[in-house]
Image (cartoon, coloured by chain):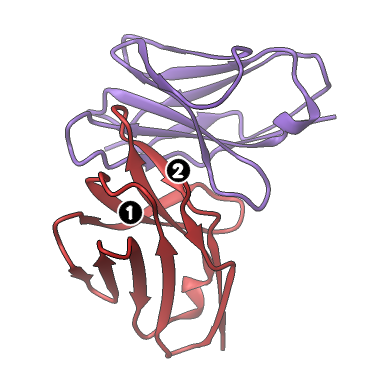
Amino acid sequence: ETGVTQSPTHLIKTRGQQVTLRCSSQSGHNTVSWYQQALGQGPQFIFQYYREEENGRGNFPPRFSGLQFPNYSSELNVNALELDDSALYLCASSQKGLRNEQFFGPGTRLTVL
Amino acid sequence: GEDVEQSLFLSVREGDSSVINCTYTDSSSTYLYWYKQEPGAGLQLLTYIFSNMDMKQDQRLTVLLNKKDKHLSLRIADTQTGDSAIYFCAETGGATNKLIFGTGTLLAVQP
């Protein structure tokens, strides 16, 4: 069984640029959730994708967007990057209805200069 | 509102028991979770408890749930240096069952 993987592991961007982060879900999982973890904080829910549709969104602006593909992998896109977007971005996969156990990838560390 | 609170720091000696506490707000959460995060790593699911349970034991881990006070605790028996990490409790919220995390408790285990 393959766990959740994310790419890249680290990324440095400048203000105003755009970034795409990728996530491969665990085998057998159909739901992907994205979280932002700022330094010293707990993860904050960005949004969730189920069967290629957005299935709920946290308090993040529209410049945060996502996609889910037929193989259940997912992308997180952030436009017009701001300094405060610097964080660890975590992807979690789960199987809807199965106790909602969410399994996390190692994260992508994004630094915005 | 959504607010999960934890104490920031706990220091114990190797071999002692550790107790990490958490208060949550959403009484409708079906499951409550404990995650572990080591430096530079993602989150590892340690254990969970169903909301109609008071206690769950899993090897060295014991979870206690007081629904009346919305209080959750994680006890680690015989704490080892490898247990040093940040521990997050999380409740589930809304139709998505999104996880709502606390700010995390840094557990430092002294040899």
Circle 2 crowding by C-alpha within 10 Å: few under 14, some 14–19, many from 20 = few
Q: In 3D space, how far apart are the residues under numbered discs 2 and 1 (Cα atoms)?
A: 15 Å
The residue depicted at 22 percent of the width and 46 percent of the height is B30
Q: Please, which chain is the residue tagged with disc 2 on?
A: B
The image quarter containing residue A18 is top right
The residue depicted at 40 percent of the width and 86 percent of the height is B17
Q: Position of residue B16 (x, y in %)?
A: 43, 90
- The residue singled out by tag 2 in the image is B2
Question: Quick one: SS at disc 1?
Answer: strand
**Nearest to N terminus: mark 2 or mark 1:** 2
Q: Identity of the amino acid at label 1?
A: Tyr
Quadrant holding the N terminus of chain A: top left
Q: Position of residue A4 (x, y in %)?
A: 40, 35
Image position of A13 (left or right of A46) = right
- Colour assignment, chain B: red
Q: Identity of the amino acid at label 2?
A: Glu
The residue depicted at 15 percent of the width and 62 percent of the height is B53
- Colour assignment, chain A: purple
Q: Please, which chain is the residue tagged with disc 1 on?
A: B
Q: Position of residue A45 (x, y in %)?
A: 48, 33
The image quarter containing residue B47 is bottom left
Image position of A73 (left or right of A43) = left
Quadrant holding the C terminus of chain A: top right
Q: Is residue B102 above or below residue A77?
A: below
Q: Is residue B95 above or below residue B26?
A: above
Question: Quick one: SS at disc 2?
Answer: loop
The residue depicted at 54 percent of the width and 26 percent of the height is A59
Of discs 2 and 1, which sits in the foreground?
2
- The residue singled out by tag 1 in the image is B33
